[in-house]
Amino acid sequence: MNEEIFDVVDENNCVIKQLPRSEVHRLGLRHRSVHLLVFNSKGELFLQKRSMKKDCSPGTWDSSVSGHLDSGEDYDECVIRESKEEIGLVLNSVPEKLFNIDACEDTGQEFVWVYRHEAEGPFTLDSEEISEGNWFAPIIISEWVEKSPEEFEASFPLIWRRLQTQ
């Protein structure tokens, strides 16, 4: 399998060059990603546990869907592609855009757009990406994030806290 190529961006999120995924991560360069928060009709959020095969934050809990933009791809295209690849969720339109977060240490130097969608599942999890997934009530997630933030991929607590202030 060929290695993914990412757009490397500057502090203003403008593309400056393209490099392989491994180089972008090794060098800590700014790049782009999406997170999709999938809620069910009970208001519970589906969280995924990252596979131990992941190069970054293996075995941690994360947003329903999270992924990097491929070179030349925009955020909306990426969230639709990643939703299908990671959890088998086919989106017929772009989900609700909630907010963006500038690249920082907590995001792994990723400029992030966060989206929201409502779906009931069940989902088909990509075992290369995700070891398990489950629905959680928001109050449980809030308590968990405060008590054990290390159990989450680093950007998720940032995203969760930002969502709670909206």
Image (tube, rainbow, N blue to C red):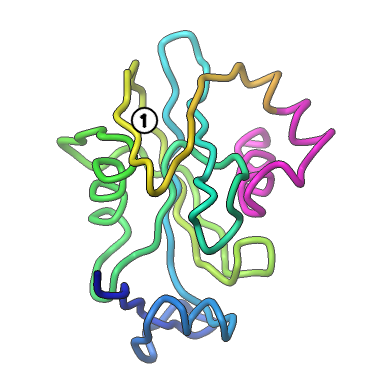
Q: Residue furthest right?
A: 147
The quadrant of the rendering that contains the C terminus is: top right
Q: Residue furthest top?
A: 42
The residue that appears at 51% across and 40% down in the rendered structure is 63
Q: Secondary structure at mark 1?
A: strand
Q: Is residue 119 above or below residue 10?
A: above
Q: Is residue 162 above or below residue 56?
A: above
Q: Residue furthest bottom?
A: 17
Classify residue 68 by image quadrant: bottom left
The residue that appears at 62% across and 53% down in the rendered structure is 155
Q: Main secondary structure of the magenta part?
A: helix
Please name whichever residue, 109 or 26, is drawn nearer the observer in this view of the structure: 26
Measured as percent of width and height from the top left, residue 54 is found at 50, 57
Q: Is residue 134 above or below residue 84?
A: above
Measured as percent of width and height from the top left, residue 82 is found at 30, 49
The residue that appears at 32% across and 35% down in the rendered structure is 87
- Going by the numbered disc 1, the residue's amino acid type is His
The residue that appears at 44% across and 49% down in the rendered structure is 66
Write down the residue under mark 1.
Answer: 117
Please state if 30 lies on the left or on the right of 16 as rendered. Answer: right
Measured as percent of width and height from the top left, residue 160 is found at 63, 39
Please name whichever residue, 119 or 76, is drawn nearer the observer in this view of the structure: 119
Residue 154 among magenta residues? yes
Where does the magenta region start and end? Answer: 142-166
Please name whichever residue, 61 or 101, is drawn nearer the observer in this view of the structure: 61
Residue 164 among magenta residues? yes
Please state if 76 lies on the left or on the right of 32 as rendered. Answer: left
The quadrant of the rendering that contains the N terminus is: bottom left
Classify residue 146 by image quadrant: top right
Please name whichever residue, 114 or 26, is drawn nearer the observer in this view of the structure: 26
Measured as percent of width and height from the top left, residue 75 is found at 32, 59
